[in-house]
Each structure stands twice: as C-alpha cells, then as structure tokens.
Image (cartoon, coloured by chain):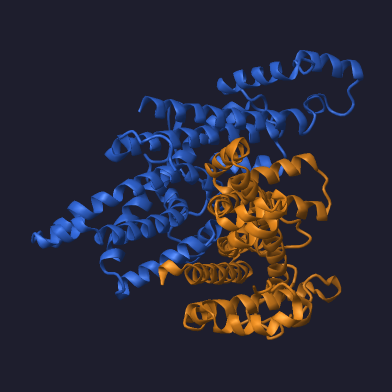
Amino acid sequence: MLAFILRRLLQAVIVMLTVAFIAFMLFQYVGDPVTNLLGQDATQEQRDQLRKDLGLDEPFPVQFARFVGNAVQGEFGLSLRQGRKVSTLIAERFPATMELALAAAVIALVVGVPLGVYAALRRGRFGSQVAMTLSLLGVSLPTFLIGILLILVFSVQLRWLPSFGRGETVALGPWTTGLLTWDGWLHLILPAITLSVFQLALILRLVRAEMLEVLRTDYVKFARARGLPDRAVYFGHALKNTLVPVITITGLQLGSLIAFAIITETVFQWPGMGFLFIQAVQFADIPVMAAYLCLIALIFVVVNLVVDLLYFAVDPRLRIEKPAGGH
Amino acid sequence: MSSPPTSATPAAPGALARFLDGDVWHSFKNSPTAIVAALIAAACIFGSLFAPWVTPHNPFDLATLSLSDARLPPAWMADGNTRYLLGTDDQGRDILSALFYGARISLLVGFASVILSMIVGVALGLLSGFAGGKVDAFIMRVCDVMLSFPSILIALLIDGVGRAIFPNAHDELAFGVLIVAIALSGWVQYARTVRGSTMVERNKEYVQAARVIGVAPIRIMVKHVLPNVMGPVLVLATIQVAAAILTEATLSFLGVGVPPTSPSLGTLIRIGNDFLFSGEWWITIFPGAMLVLIALSVNLLGDWLRDALNPRLR
C-alpha cells in the first residue's frame, strides 16, 4: 500500500518535472526573452545587462531550478501580449472554467448513468437502440459543432438562451461566480450541455457495456435464482459493481473536461482559461502558454493520483499484494 | 511453402479470389452498416480527390467570384439560385464546391498525419517490444505521460510551439507543423498496441528460428514480426483517420490550423460562425454536416473492421 502510493507520487513528480522542463525550454528557446522585453532597437550593452539581470548567463541547471522555484509559487512573468502578470490573468479566468467543467460533469453523470443502465436492461429494444445511436453521434460530433448547433437552435432561432459570455457574476472574494444569479445560470446552460455531450455519450456506453458484462456473471444469476426482485438485482447488485470503472473514467475525464473547455469556451466566448490559452497560442504568448500548460498538468496529475487512490479504496481486491515476478 | 503474396501479377488473382472467399469480405457483405459507410466514405474521398472536376465552380478562382452573388441561400429557399445548390458565402463562393475543396484539405491532413503517426508509433512499439529492458521502460514512460493528457491538448501545444518557432511561416510550413502536431498526439496508441503483440510474437518459434540462423534483429523485426502485428494497427489507423480529421477541424476552427488561404472544413465552419446570427446558417451547417458524415462513416468502417478481424467476437 505505502509502496504503491510512494511509487505513484514519484511518477507524479516526474511528470510535473517533465512538463516544467518543456515549459522552461519554451521560455528559453522559443522567442528571445531579451528581444521581447527590450524591443529590436536595444544596444548590445543593454542586452547584456538585461541578460545578466534576468540570470540568463548562468548555467542551465541553475536557471531551470530557478524556473521551477518560480513556477511552484505561480510566478510565470508577464504576458507578452497583455503586459499583465500571468498569474493574475489565470486567477481571474480560473473560476469560470471550473464552474463550466463541474456543471458539465454533473450533467454527464446524472443523465449518462441512468441512460446506460436503461440501454443495458432493454438491450435490442427500440429505446435502447435510439440511445446507442445518439451516443455514437455524440462521440462522433466534434464539440465545437455541437456548440454551434445549440446556438443556432436556442439562441438564433428560438431566442431562448444567451450565446456568449458568463452573464452577471458575483464576486466572492477572489472567486467570481455566475451560480448566484439567474442570468449566470441562463448563460451556463448551453456551454455546459455542449461540454457534457461527449462525456455523457462515453459514460452511457461504458455503463451499458459494464452492466451487460455484470449481468452475465454467476452471482447475478444466483441472485435471480434466489428470487430477488429485478430492482434489487439490477440496482443493488449489478449497478454497484459497475461503478468502479465508472468512477475511474469520470474522475479521469474531469481533467479532460477542463482541457476540452478550450473549445467550448471559444465557441461561447466564455471568459475562462481555455479562451485565454487559445489567444496565447494564436499570438505565440509563451508565458501564458507555459503557465497554462503547467496548471493543466498539475490538475491532471492530481486527478489521476486521487483516482488511483480511490480505486484502491473502492476495490478490495487491489489491496492484496500481488505475487512478484509476473510471467 | 507458399510464397508471400507480395510479388505482383502471378499472386494477384489468387489473392483476390482468396479475399472474396475470406471471412472479411463475407462479413462486409452481410453488414449493411459497413456497406453504407463504405459507400459514403468512398463518395467523399472520390469527390474530394477530383474536386476540380466534379464541383460546379472553382471557389478560389477570383475571376469567377462576384459579390452580387454573396450570401445567397440554398437553391430550394425563396431567394435561392439554382447555380448555387447549397448557397454562397460572404464572398460569393459556392458552398457546394467549397465543401469538396475543403474536404480535400481535411482528408489530406488527416491521412498524412495518420501515416506519420503510424510510422512513428509502429517503429517505437516494435523497438520497445523487441528490445525490452531500459529502452522499453523509457518508451513506455513517455507513453504514460502522453496518455495522461487528451490528444487535442497535445496537438494544440505542439502547434502553438511550432507557431512560436516559425512566426512568419509560409503555407507549406504551416501545413507541416499542423500535420506533425496531430501525428505526435496520436502515435502512442500504435506504440502500445504494437509493443503488446510484439512481446507475444518475440517468444514464438519462428522468431527464435530466425535468430538461430543468424538473421539480423532489424530484419527479424521488419520482415517477420511486423506483418504479424499489423492487423490491430490497421483497425486503429482507420479509427485514427476519423480522429485526425476531427482534430484538424477543431484546430482550424480555433484559428490555429491550416492557413486561411486553403480553407479546410474546420476553417469553413469558423468563417460561417460569424454569419450565424444574421441568419445565414448554410455557410456553417453544410461544412459541419460534411465533416460529421466523413467522421461517422470512417468510424463505422473502423468498428466493423475491428469486429471482422477479431475472431473472438463472432
């Protein structure tokens, strides 16, 4: 158990260091930071002075160590395009992305799990066929197209829902939330649905496949033979055992929700981190790109780690030490 | 001992007859989904390959464009013109023609990046499975790290870095950066698949026999092991073509994909998005439908191929 946790922690640290190294290389070799700060007309002395001030003349490992030190404190310098501190920019945008991602995750789970169970129990019937076809469409439709279609139907044709921005927000300290105003909720609906469609289809298909697998096992047959009512068999025995992979996938998908939010945020001009990142890519704004990269990597690593540990807690079979060796 | 069916003419009729009598073809004939998907995919590919000949207009020939034809709705609507079946965009370009020209670029980027990522992935997978030890451990750790991020994010990042390195890139270079970005986000899947099968094949007798008679390891890998691990790779490649086309469309939609001078389906959707609110839905919706049609048919073909090549599912 302890060895497992330590190994996972070590892996997480290595991933973070790798990502930090990539971000560092970006800073170092893509676009000359000195030229960026001084402009083209600076004299050679000014350049050398700045190079010294920034510590760019020091050996490579020292520079990398300082970069990591700064990154740990959330310090990534100034945005090349906006001239503001990158950490402030990201802190402003972070709540918008988190609220969007969480809303999408909730929709995906609340709709996806029951539909998956339904599709498994009514296998081959019309309703379940419809659900499966729609889910295939959900996996094949690119996120931005779903967003455009929703805007076309609900904003342009029906004029029911707003199509861009977060609406009215309330500031709770550093955290601005759209969840406390009616306007904020209205603005959240379309982006959240857009972001959730892919995950919803994924969860639906996963739950269905797992349910079909479990329904074939002996203990379910045995429970039936004992005369337990269908409800108890399906929800008490079968569904419970399908939840382990569902929890894992959902957890892991939380990270990709935040990443896929880039697309949704662009379509709906949602003022989140993803929108910031896309603008940074378009204008080659390296500090913002590097900071976003490190933050996303951190979120992914933490989520993966938590899911691994949860897995451990949920599935007792994993706790037994496996015999060493393998084949 | 039968000679491998690589030699061209003598083996060809036999190979074709064997294929027509084989499981794969039978399964294809009995799957309506696969037939429809194959027809749609073939039509899209044919139409895009021969776009200059099958389309009614050349959307990029400035001489034939006229702004008085701009923003015409599809032919069946009130203001429509039968010259432009699916309407025109803001510069008077025929949407139907732009669709095929756009699909051509989408398919080009999709296929090129899949081939590139297949080469990288298969090579690294073979090496990893065959060499084992530290090489294997290193390659697999890299795979782990890459797999923990969504491929679209990796593609975006590589694309962003490419743009930063070549800020004034001309068109060909922009295409190259895009293809490399998509390819490098997808090779991991191949590497892991090939590594798994290679590790199984490595211990089989024919490989040991080849070793004993002194065949060089590279030759064993390429000539003997590779043909036996290609089945799953082909299935994966089919599905990855759809994924790569969607990734390209997404990047182009986000404005960091193909150069605007040669618009792909994603670029067309991005352009059309600006006219959504003025009611000109056709500029966006038709390229979107084309994109979904291609992705869906290729995906269905991939699903069918996976089932057909996997005897356990029958």
Rendered location of residue B162, percent (x, y): 74, 43
**Residue in the picture at 42% in, 64% down:** A135
Rendered location of residue A202, percent (x, y): 42, 56
Rendered location of residue A10, percent (x, y): 50, 26
Q: Residue A225: name its quadrant.
A: bottom left
Q: Is residue B185 visible?
A: no
**Residue in the picture at 56% in, 21% down:** A72
**Could you tell me which quadrant the N terminus of chain A lies in?**
top left
The residue positioned farthest toward the front in the image shown: B213
Above or below — where is A151 with respect to B154? below
Q: Residue A222: name its quadrant.
A: bottom left
**Could you tell me which quadrant the C terminus of chain A lies in?**
top left
Q: Is residue B232 visible?
A: yes
Q: Nearer the viewer, residue B282 or B141?
A: B141
Q: Residue A25: name its quadrant.
A: top right
Above or below — where is B121 with respect to B245? above
Left or right of B81 on screen, residue A229: left
Colour in which chain B is shown? orange
Left or right of A134 on screen, residue B65: right
Colour in which chain A is shown? blue
**Residue in the picture at 58% in, 49% down:** B151
Rendered location of residue B194, percent (x, y): 58, 53
The residue positioned farthest toward the left in the image shown: A227
Above or below — where is A269 with respect to A74? below
> Disc count in the image?
0
Q: Nearer the viewer, residue A255 or B214?
A: B214
